[in-house]
Structures are given as C-alpha cells and as structure tokens.
Image (cartoon, rainbow, N blue to C red):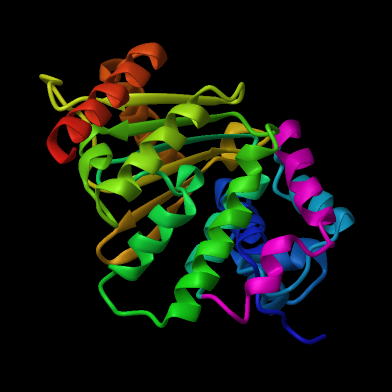
C-alpha cells in the first residue's frame, strides 16, 4: 500500500494513537504483536502515513486498555473523515502552515485567539490583509498577495457562518499599528466593531493601561476539539508557525488565556475603547 502525505488531522490522529500506546507502557513492537501487524505499520499509523480504520482504532484502544470512551469515539470520528475540505484545494498553491491553520479552525468546536501586534486574521478586512501580506519580511508578487488574501477570506467563513463561537483577545498595540495607512486602519476598526456584535463573536481589548499584563509575545490560536484531549494551540513567532497539542502544553496555554481574559476589557468597554482610538485618529489626521 502506498504511503500518503498526511494532513494535520491525520498526523494528530496518529499522535493520539502513539500517546495511547505510551500511556499503556507498550513499545511499538509489543503493540504490533498484539495487533498481529508489523512494527513498521504501527510506526506508519502513528505518523499518519498509513490510514487507520475505525475497526483498527478500536482494536488499538482495546489493546492499550484505554478506558476514555469519549476520546476513543472522537478519534473514531477523525478516522471516518474521508471527504476533501475546501482548504485541500490550496495544498499545491500555498505552504503547509496556512493550510494547517485553516484545518484547525475548520474542525474546531470553539476558537479563542490572542494577538498583540496585528488584527486577528479571522477579522481582517481585505485592504488590511493585503497591506499585511505586502509588508512582510519578504516581498511577494501581487498575484501571491491576492492568493493569500482570498485564502484568508475563505478562512473567515468559519466565523461569518455563525457556526463557531469565537473569542478574540486583542492587545491595544494591534489596534494602533497602521498597516496600509490611517484610512486602511479606520476601515479595519469600523469592521472590527461590526464583527464584535455578531452573536458568535466576543471581542475583548487588552489596553495599554493594564497594570499587570500576563500575556505572551506571540500570537495564539486556541482551538477546542470535541473533547479537551483534542484541543490544539497554534502560535506564530518570528521563526514561523508552531502547533502544540500535548496535555502539558494545552494546560499551560489555557492558563495563559485565562489570565489574559482576567485583564481584558468587557465587550462593551472594548467597543468604546476602539471608538476612542478612531476618534484620536480623526483628530490627528483630519
């Protein structure tokens, strides 16, 4: 059987099978003997290169004495996924990182983000997104900028559809950096206020005046899965995009986000704060 190039979800399913095996105290060869397969097949399943059927998943869970029924059923749902998603159309046109982010967002039950220097991608206007991509570390041709902006538009449907609850924690710095100039930022802030009134969106600002800012320096996306064990964190840094999913990492990021929520302004005060920034801009530039 030909080995596939695994998607993020397929890699995650494999990683959870590996965790299940390790929690049982088994090596790969021992689990292979229990299943009647080769150690190579166990390895391929655990890195996502070989498909895992629902029946095989249950065999592994039974062999590893996994009593976490909600987790096993959630993994079975992942194993059943066969249909291509909209982001699969872009796999030959874009790098893996933005595809992985779209996959995380598209499969999440609930999303929470924290951004410190930029408006969250899920809430960016086209003009703002264009300015962000055009002023990156490397100069991109116009057609590549356009492709990335259109991909970001597609990602935003997860919020525009109203299906996924979304909490956006935004540091005041992100509300003041003028990507594309004052007019672009004003349009973006106007749009941000409108989006904050969507029933599934909670926008909360972390103001400069916060006395004890507990947040990290990177932008974060926390995606809740069908069970807590399948939550995922995606973090941006100057070295690229990073994905975290170990229990310890998830617990740490949950604690960080709770601390940020504790100092962020309530929703109505956040909208008022954005309006005050817009008034400052108007007074300065008009």
Most common SS among magenta residues: helix
Farthest residue toward the front? 286
**Foreground residue among 205 and 105:** 205
- Figure quadrant of residue 131: bottom left
Residue 222: percent from left, percent from top: 47, 39
Q: Which residues are magenta?
A: 68-94
- Out of 179 and 239, give the one closest to the viewer: 179
Residue 24 to residue 242: above or below: above
- Of all residues, the one furthest to the bottom in this rendering is 2
Residue 67 visible within the image: no
Q: Residue at x 37, y 20 (%)?
A: 271
- What residue do we see at 75% from left, 51% from top? 78
Which sits in the foreground, 13 or 42? 13
Q: Residue 84 in magenta?
A: yes
Q: Nearer the viewer, residue 2 or 168?
A: 168
Q: Quadrant of the N terminus?
A: bottom right
Identify the residue at horizontal 45%, vertical 47% (top origin): 124
Left or right: 137 in relation to 225: left
Residue 68's spot in the image, x, y percent?
70, 33
Horizontal side of residue 180 vs 152, given as left or right:
left
Task: Measuring from the top left, give residue 170's x and y in whole percent.
Answer: 33, 34
Horizontally, is 95 left or right of 172 in the view? right
Q: Is residue 231 magenta?
A: no
Q: Is residue 203 above or below residue 234?
A: above
């Amino acid at each position: 059987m030909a080995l596939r190039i695994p998607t993020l979800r397929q890699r995650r399913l494999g990683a959870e099978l590996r965790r299940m095996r390790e929690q049982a105290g088994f090596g790969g060869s021992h689990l292979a003997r229990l299943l009647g397969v080769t150690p190579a097949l166990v390895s391929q399943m655990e890195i996502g290169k070989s498909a895992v059927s629902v029946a095989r998943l249950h065999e592994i869970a039974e062999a590893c004495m996994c009593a976490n029924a909600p987790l096993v059923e959630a993994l079975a749902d992942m194993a059943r996924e066969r249909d291509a998603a909209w982001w699969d159309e872009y796999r030959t046109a874009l790098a893996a990182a933005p595809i992985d982010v779209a996959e995380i967002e598209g499969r999440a039950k609930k999303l929470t983000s924290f951004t410190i220097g930029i408006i969250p991608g899920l809430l960016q206007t086209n003009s703002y997104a264009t300015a962000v991509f055009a002023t990156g570390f490397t100069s991109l041709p116009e057609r590549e900028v356009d492709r990335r902006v259109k991909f970001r538009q597609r990602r935003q449907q997860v919020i525009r559809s109203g299906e996924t609850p979304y909490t956006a924690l935004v540091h005041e710095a992100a509300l003041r950096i003028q990507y594309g100039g004052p007019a672009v930022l004003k349009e973006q802030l106007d749009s941000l206020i409108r989006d904050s009134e969507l029933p599934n969106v909670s926008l909360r600002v972390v103001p400069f005046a916060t006395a004890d800012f507990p947040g990290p320096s990177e932008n974060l996306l926390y995606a809740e899965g069908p069970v807590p064990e399948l939550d995922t964190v995606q973090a941006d840094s100057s070295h690229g995009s990073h994905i975290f999913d170990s229990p310890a990492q998830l617990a740490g990021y949950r604690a960080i986000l709770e601390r940020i929520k504790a100092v962020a302004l309530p929703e109505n005060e956040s909208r008022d704060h954005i309006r005050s920034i817009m008034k400052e801009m108007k007074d300065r530039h008009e």
